[in-house]
Amino acid sequence: MAVVVHQRGIEDKSGQSAAIQRMFSSIAARYDFLNRFLSLGIDKSWRKKAVDEAWRDSTKTILDVCAGTGDLSLAFMERMKTGRITVSDFCYEMLELAQPKLDRHQHLQSELVQADATCLPFRSGKFDVVGAAFGIRNVTDLDAGIFEMARVARAGGRVVILEFSQPDNSIFSAVYLFYFKHILPLLGRLLSGSHIDAYRYLPKSVLAFATAEELKSRMELAGLVDVSYRKLMCGAVSIHVGNKS
Ligand SMILES: C[S@@+](CC[C@H](N)C(=O)[O-])C[C@H]1O[C@@H](n2cnc3c(N)ncnc32)[C@H](O)[C@@H]1O
């Protein structure tokens, strides 16, 4: 399956967005390995929980935004009996690595679409569920990204966002921040072999990102209703779900 490229929003990026795209391209080959290693494998269970939160038996069409190598898509596909999954990201090198994961689920329809999350090439109301795992934090215009996710969800459909957030417990928070600020960038740099400092960017982007409560408000601002969130790992990660009215 070829990656369908949508140039609108891919070219002519602001400096920051282009730098983020380059950074993910540079770590694509080692991304899955590093995710498993740096999260001690827990990241898979977080994606599965996000799927559980978003899932309804009627779910047939799914869009995974900022999908990277397709791990959230994979978690959805493990739940689907029939239907279609669209795997979308602005980084071609990440999307290419999603292909073998889609191939494991030949009974499902799937497509790979290179597109910017702030300018999705899909008609409004197309998908039952629109999800993003650890992706929306990286979108330079967060509100535009959430707005687009809400736009392409059908009325009665759901938007689910799995993201890092700030832990509540002060002792856990201190340990977590030490790991995040000092250990993780070091391990990431050593293991990714990337000359671009992607694993220094990771803690920075997490610490600068919206709190769980703020993200809920931003989802409501995009027109989503009944937005709720569930915290995992003492609040270090959260799953937000909103409905499209
Ligand atoms: C940390 S990875 C997450 C990948 C995957 N969802 C996962 O669960 O592992 C973030 C992804 O967001 C993508 N991304 C960042 N900004 C984007 C944008 N504006 N439009 C589309 N994709 C974007 C990056 O290319 C990268 O693949």
Image (cartoon, helix red, strand yellow):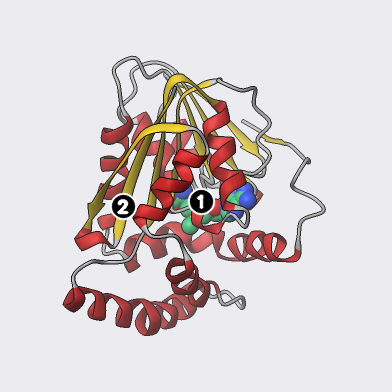
| Secondary structure found at label 1 | helix
Farthest residue in the right direction? Answer: 12
Residue 96 in sight here: no
The quadrant of the rendering that contains the C terminus is top left
| Secondary structure found at label 2 | strand
User: Residue 99, how many percent across, how many down?
Assistant: 53, 39
Depth order, front residue of 43/134: 134
Quarter occupied by residue 20: bottom right
| Mark 1 neighbour class, 10 Å CA radius: few under 14, some 14 to 19, many 20 or more | many
Return the disc, 1 or 2, that comes first in the chain's sequence: 1
Instruction: Establish whether ligand 1 lies closer than 8 Å to the Cβ of label 1.
Output: no
Q: Give the residue displayed 46% in from the left and 42% down from the top.
A: 219
Residue 101 position (above or below residue 199):
above
User: Residue 63, how many percent across, how many down?
Assistant: 50, 31
The quadrant of the rendering that contains the N terminus is top right
Q: Give the residue displayed 58% in from the left and 45% down from the top.
A: 145
Figure disc tally: 2
Depth order, front residue of 236/31: 236
Which of the numbered marks, if any, corresponds to residue 238?
2
Q: Give the residue displayed 56% in from the left and 27% down from the top.
A: 152
Quarter occupied by residue 214: bottom left
| Mark 2 neighbour class, 10 Å CA radius: few under 14, some 14 to 19, many 20 or more | many
Is the C-beta separation of discs 1 and 2 under 8 Å?
no
Q: Amino acid at mark 2?
A: Ser
User: Residue 119, how many percent across, how many down?
Assistant: 68, 39
Question: Horizontally, is 119 left or right of 209 in the view?
Answer: right
Q: Amino acid at mark 1?
A: Ile
**Which residue is identified by label 1?**
136
Q: CA distance from mark 1 to mark 2?
A: 13 Å
